[in-house]
Image (cartoon, helix red, strand yellow):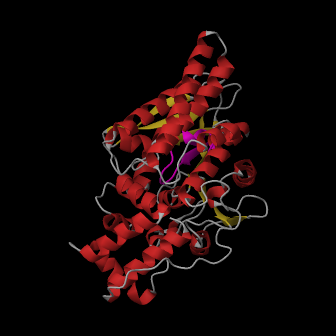
Amino acid sequence: MNRRSLLNVAAALTAVASGSDAVAQPAPVPADAHAGTDALLFKEDPQFWYETVRMFGAAEYGGALFGEVMAIARQIEPGNYDSWYDAHRTFADRLAAEAEAQLKQGHRISARDNYLRACNYHRSSEFFLHANPDDPRMARAFERSVACYRASAALFAPAIEPLEIPYEGTTLLGYFHAPAGPARRRPTILVNNGFDGSAEEMHWGAARAAVDRGWNALVFDGPGQFAAVHRAKLYFRPDWEKVVTPVVDFALKRPDVDPRRIALHGISFGGYLAPRAVAFERRIAACIADDGVYDYGAAQLSGVPEASRAQVKAALSAPSAPQLDARLQQMMKANSVARWAFTQGMYAMGVASPRAYLAAAQAYHLRGGIAEQIQCPTLVCDAEKDLFFNGQAQQLYDHLTCRKTLMKFTDAEGAGAHCEVGASRLAFARMYDWLDETLSA
């Protein structure tokens, strides 16, 4: 959620904790709160705008085209989830059909590129539909996004390899990206996406930047993420080392992975997941938290006065709290970001209400000495106007006792938004230069 949503939710929670019947009013937002991310489209719907910027950013590694995203946006009614789906689906289907025809004519590069963008538009189409996990449009979008990506992946040189990684009696979907050249052991980055990303999206979300620099990239969807929820209803878990350890086991069985140079890059909510994992999984040689998250649960309660925190947490986990439930429903109706964040949280954590999501979120933290257990060199990224986790990166950095670096990104250089969306080539250059220097030292 962005800052306005968090402040409004905090007001509602505090009012309930204090026994007030007053309806929480929208909280004021500092004048510069949205600096660097002012909406050019969807001015009344910040969540639609952020997702559009995310699509613009995907163009840096072939996941979108600026003109296509603009053409899609023109077909969308702000706040209308059905129109978001329809606009993206229509474009994705057309591109996939064009790619199929190109492949039949032997135009492999053209087909590869069109399949890749079709994958992303299908992924984005179902982004706002998670209030109803049984909506057939979600399954269609997931299946076609994966199919388009696999068609594209097969046309890269070398081909990107689909993976099924053993995990607790089932498998996690992933992909292995390798640089061109003779087979040999190479440094390998494990790419851990976040609250709402996909392994396919990590193609332009880090993997190809790593391959360009001579690294293998192994990307995967863990519980709570795209394929894991769609295929097996596996939901997020706070003890993320139980997810990463099987991925490390899998990587170490490959002859092309250097066991001494395995790094973990966590993106967005992965800025919590990755540090949590390396606090316990000691075979990881370096960690990137992009952007860093120290206490995800606390971030959801940002703005709640300290004196009210205990009461608020008790209300969240109470068997029944109808007044609080009603307030949270009001927030979802009034604020597009809260509407999406609560819906996504319920979907990805496998709970039935906004209050249950906020209660579940309290387990995701690095307090109690967890951050201090991290031993590998750790890079903490901090975007100047990260409206989702503002201040969290500094907290994580301050608690680390390992070799550590805080890397700041600013609005002035076009990289101040959450996870440096729209400036990924600049950001990955700095991150992966740090990684090369760290593991060669």
Q: Report the residue that reaches farthest toward the right.
A: 412
* Image quadrant in which the C terminus is located: bottom right
Q: Report the residue that reaches farthest toward the left.
A: 319
Q: Where does the magenta region start and end?
A: 188-206
Q: Nearer the viewer, residue 25 or 288?
A: 25
Quarter occupied by residue 69: top right
Could you tell me residue 49's position as x and y percent? 59, 55
Count of all numbered marks drawn on residues in the image: 0
State the residue at coordinates (71%, 55%): 438
State the residue at coordinates (60%, 52%): 285
Could you tell me residue 107's position as x and y percent? 67, 15
Quarter occupied by residue 400: bottom right
Above/below status of 102 relative to 369:
above
- Is residue 249 magenta-colored? no
Could you tell me residue 41's position as x and y percent? 64, 53
Q: Nearer the viewer, residue 35 or 330?
A: 330
Above/below status of 276 relative to 85:
below
State the residue at coordinates (62%, 65%): 386
4 left or right of 240? Answer: right
Above/below status of 62 relative to 383:
above
Examine the rendering and report whether any part of residue 293 can be seen.
yes
Q: Nearer the viewer, residue 385 or 404?
A: 385
State the residue at coordinates (62%, 21%): 111
Could you tell me residue 328's position as x and y percent? 36, 70
Examine the rendering and report whether any part of residue 253 can be seen.
no
Q: Nearer the viewer, residue 218 or 384?
A: 384
- Is residue 191 magenta-colored? yes
